[in-house]
Image (cartoon, helix red, strand yellow):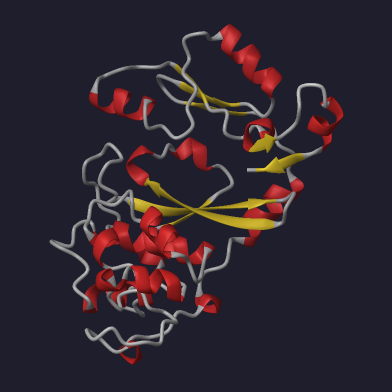
Amino acid sequence: RLTGTKYGCGGGGCGACTVMISTYEPASKKIRHYSANACLLPICSLYGMAVTTVEGVGSTRTRIHPVQERLAKCHGSQCGFCTPGMVMSIYTLLRNHPEPTLEQMTAALAGNCSPLADRCPTIPHSKQSLSLHREKILVLFSFSFKESVGLFSPDEFQPLDPTQEFIFPPELMRMAEDQPKRTLFFHGERMMWISPVSLDELQDLKAAHPKAPLLVGNTGVGPDMKFRGVFHPIVIAPARIPDLNVVAVATVHDTDFFLHNTVEY
């Protein structure tokens, strides 16, 4: 009965259903957070990940989050249906970047159907970006911005305290550390989801199932299946292949450099 996440367009266009996806990467020992459209996010793709909905951010029954408080006090919503998605986009940004730049703020809200991205970006940013965009600024996201812009005083809002956020589930960290990566198979009544862990295995799967689509963000396959009645008995999800998550820079003849200098993307 968590009804905060809204179903709007159903095709990943409005952002009303935005949730936060958190992953733990054993190699780098880092936790990463991503905002995602729940309406297009296959459950099979979430193996080992944590999902946070707007109820996990704050509630009037417990305590509203500083993001929610600013949206409410600064009239940052229209009818309010899409507001939970905006909250999740901003919240995810702040989990990754407690003091983001104006460019990061604009990019974070690009997937939400709202003028908020143009009118209200005042999460902490540099004095240079402040002077360039002063007429667009509200105090809406001024978590550490101390200068009043005339509409509200920063003292009216509760501060952002990263230490009060939920931690990544320890059991998922242990699972990522202890369990070797293996191919995942999920079987349904009509279709099968296959998630390989190597390029060789991916090539073998495509050779055995040439009509099976490769699914990563699900922005193509998802709408086709949902709105156009396209059916795929087998879907191949290559997102867990390490080789597809790095970028290597090398010359054509510098094979040794290529093999030993991959960088995480």
Q: On the rendered structure, is 164 left or right of 88?
A: right
Above or below, 259 relative to 95: above
Above or below, 112 relative to 116: above
In which image quadrant can residue 230 be found?
A: top left
Q: Residue furthest left?
A: 79
Q: Nearer the viewer, residue 254 or 182?
A: 254
Q: Position of residue 155 (x, y in %)?
A: 35, 92
Q: Residue furthest bottom?
A: 155
Q: On the rendered structure, is 142 left or right of 255?
A: left
Residue 2 in sight from this viewpoint: no
Q: Nearer the viewer, residue 120 or 46?
A: 120
Q: Position of residue 233 (x, y in %)?
A: 43, 16
Above or below, 232 relative to 100: above
Q: Quadrant of the C terminus?
A: top right
The structure residue drawn at horizontal position 55% and vertical position 49%, both measured from the top left corner, is 49
Q: Quadrant of the N terminus?
A: bottom left
Q: On the rendered structure, is 41 left or right of 167?
A: left
Residue 172 in sight from this viewpoint: yes
Q: Nearer the viewer, residue 155 or 213?
A: 155
Above or below, 167 relative to 32: below
The structure residue drawn at horizontal position 69% and vertical position 48%, both measured from the top left corner, is 176
Q: Position of residue 134 (x, y in %)?
A: 30, 73
Q: Position of residue 166 (x, y in %)?
A: 52, 69
Q: How many marks?
A: 0
The structure residue drawn at horizontal position 41% and vertical position 79%, both measured from the top left corner, is 143
The structure residue drawn at horizontal position 46% and vertical position 9%, both measured from the top left corner, is 211
